[in-house]
Amino acid sequence: MSQRSYNKLWADVQLELSRLLAEELPAEPLRPEKDRVVFFQRVALFYVRYLQIFRKLEIYDQVVHPQKRRLIRTILDGVIGRLLELKNEMVEKEYSEYHYMDDILHDLKLSPADLEIPIPRYFITECSKEFQERKTMVTDILKMVEVTESLEPLKVKEMSPEKAIKIIQVAERARQGRLRAKLNEESRNMNRMYKTKEPGAADIELAAVCIQKVWRGYVERKRTKIAREEEMIFLGMAMDPKYKVPRPAEIAVKATEACNRIKQQEHEEDYQKSIVAITKQLLDVEGHDMSNTMKDQIRQWFIECRDANGSFPDYPDAEDGGSALLFAEKNPQQLMEEIAAKEEDDSNNRSKGKEEKKKNGKKDKGKTDIEEEEEGLKMLPSAFLSDLQVGNQTFEDFWQNRNESQNFVQRHEVELIKEERRKVIEADILLQVDVQMRQELAEWKLAVDKDKGGKTKGNAKKKKGSKSGKKKKKEKDLTADRTLESLCQELVEQGLLKKPNNVALQDYIGDYSYLGTTLRQYDIEPMPSLSDVRQVLTLYGILPLGSQVVHERAPLIKAILLTGPAGVGKKMLVHAICQETGANLFDLSPLNTAGKYPGKSGLAMMLHMVFKVARLLQPSVIWIGDAEKMFYKKVPKEEKELEPKRLKKDLSKSLKLIKAEDRVLIVGTTRDPLSADIKSLCKMYSKILLIPRPDYGSRYILWKQLITNQGGEVTKALDLSSLSKISDGYTPGHMVRVVQRVVTKRRVLHQAKRPLTASEFVPPLAKIDPVFQEEEEALKNWYAKTPLGKKRIKAATGKDEEEAPVKNKDAKKKKGKK
């Protein structure tokens, strides 16, 4: 696809975004919605539309123009952030992490595949040089530790007598089998030697007929099979084999994409060089004039203030913007009033703050009840809509109608660089001018106002500022004298910093939940599908970790708990988050930390090192496997030596210190949350995701994908539908084990003569215990006791709506008594 086509696609996306912004930010604000269902539908519609814009903005990966890329990136970050805000809004209004929007998909004529959330490639490709250097440092340390471990002398593993006997039996039976085969072959050879009778004409004829019969049957079966395959291809029920092989057009597309990425780097380098050259040119040509004009304007302001008030003004502080206030096109009188008003507000707020709060508290109590009655459901204020508006306006002003016929190669625009750099240069020069003009103003005051005692208001301001400024306690750096490399090496050696497995989120296979909407209409809470889990984890884990801008301003999620039966893919999802965002993986599982860094001081050192390195190497994921062990109601006797609860207090304190600027995510996994104290567990993890066993659709896709990945061939002889039906209750982990046991290298070689059948998978499947209905129900009941689960039950029973008017009545009664 050419750059012209990408520009057209971008224009279409911007048009859709402008329409959406006009609906979200109308001239007259929307009235509060009293009906919760109607409000949720409005939010869900916005969510789906923003998601479609997000999917279309993937053109960012192929656009070559450096200045367009910057604008698309800001819009892309804004859309991601708004998507997360709307998701948070839907969760708070529907009291569920999973949503089903079949009616919206039907209205917008979209398919379930259009709800898939893409993961931008720039999360990994566009990293700073420092980040890349640190990444290479960590990978080198990991490789070095792996090599040293492999060079260690092999330890002899202990073997039980039963296992040893089994190995001997296998070897002996194999030896006996080989001997039997050899004896049978020898006996056959002896029989052939004794049969010296020559075949007659009748025998030859019978042999020929037999050969003809077999051959003709084989040829006819082959023809019938080819005819059937051609018919299925013609009806569109099977894929033509030629389309399974990459077509020349597909290969050409991949080549152009790779070429575009090389061009992006070249154009970016040219852009950075031109920025440096243009900045230098502007400083040389226009810098001196800018400085002189600023000084003249500031001097003029001094004189006007002197004429108006009889004394020179105080120079605005750097915190308030310095002399930038003077260039806001205001009179000297207005500026003096503004500065004086700020000083009065600062002094009054300190002394009268408490009194005003008490008075306002009393007044507001009377108003809240009336406002609650009048108000309905409103959208929460957004931190990204203003950025989207600015980005959209920039596109309309500069890029929408721009003639780029002369810029076929899509290199940078020099005039746009000059406009941007002028603002930066003006700001830099203004800081220098402020220093000089403060000094000049002080000299003027000394020269003209000698009779006024020499005390200036500026000194008083500084004193006030020094009194009011309270210093916050900083964390003690226990490893201030150590380098990052040494800390990483120690964590790797201790097994706390690990290399994540090479797993993509798309490898977590699952089908869309088609019955979700229908079940909710009949007040039945559906179990989420694996596809729903994948989407929610993308929103909560991958998108915020991947972008610094999004993480700082989107709803902050510090910790996620993944709970579900063994084998549903919890650990795989943790590794997928790390792989998709380029995050480092720290393992603080109770079993992994047992016996390491003993004592209170050792524990504090371990957590300090982990969180310090996690912040320096962000994005980072801190994984806590078997998270329930940390919050045991009662520690089992066999685990008391491991001290599984020793991280409980200190880890919650470290969690509070994670700020919006820190791209650090704690992910816990548990298969037995019932053994943990639910209150402390929910306090630690703000988001709890219940991962169920796969439904029929997910199992069908999983069987097909796992068999093909193992080298098997899915033919008509393999009844996947029946296999999916009988494997109800089994997790993806169970299915992987079964496929590995059945589809061996030897079995793959015999596929041509003997295709795979469903019956081959049944015996190994029968040896594994499935996830029974009782276990799933127990997890469901446990989830209903979590904060979000409780809210969901209240909303379903209608208690939430009934409690609101009761509260209002009580408040009115209290008023009457007063």
Image (spheres, helix red, strand yellow):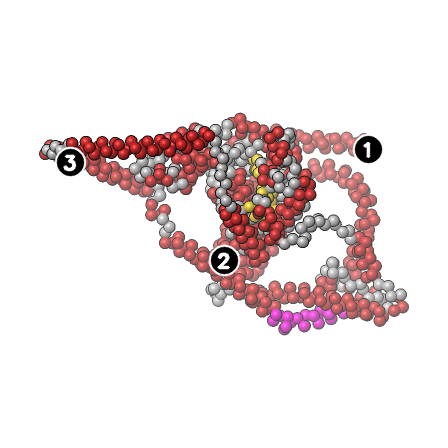
Residue at numbered disc 1: 818
Give neighbour class at mark 2: few <14, some 14-19, many 20+ (Cα, 10 Å): many
Q: Quadrant of the C terminus?
A: top right
Mark 1 / mark 2, whichever is N-terminal: 2
- Is residue 329 something one can see in this rendering? no
- Is residue 659 something one can see in this rendering? yes
710 or 64, nearer to the observer = 710
Q: Position of residue 566 (x, y in %)?
A: 52, 34
Residue at numbered disc 3: 208
Circle 3: element type = helix
Circle 1: element type = loop
- Vertical position of residue 342 compared to residue 649: above or below: below
Residue at numbered disc 2: 63
The range drawn in magenta is 280-300
Give the residue displayed 63% in from the left and 54% down from the top: 483
Spatial CA span between label 1 and label 2:
68 Å
Mark 1–mark 2 contact, CB under 8 Å? no
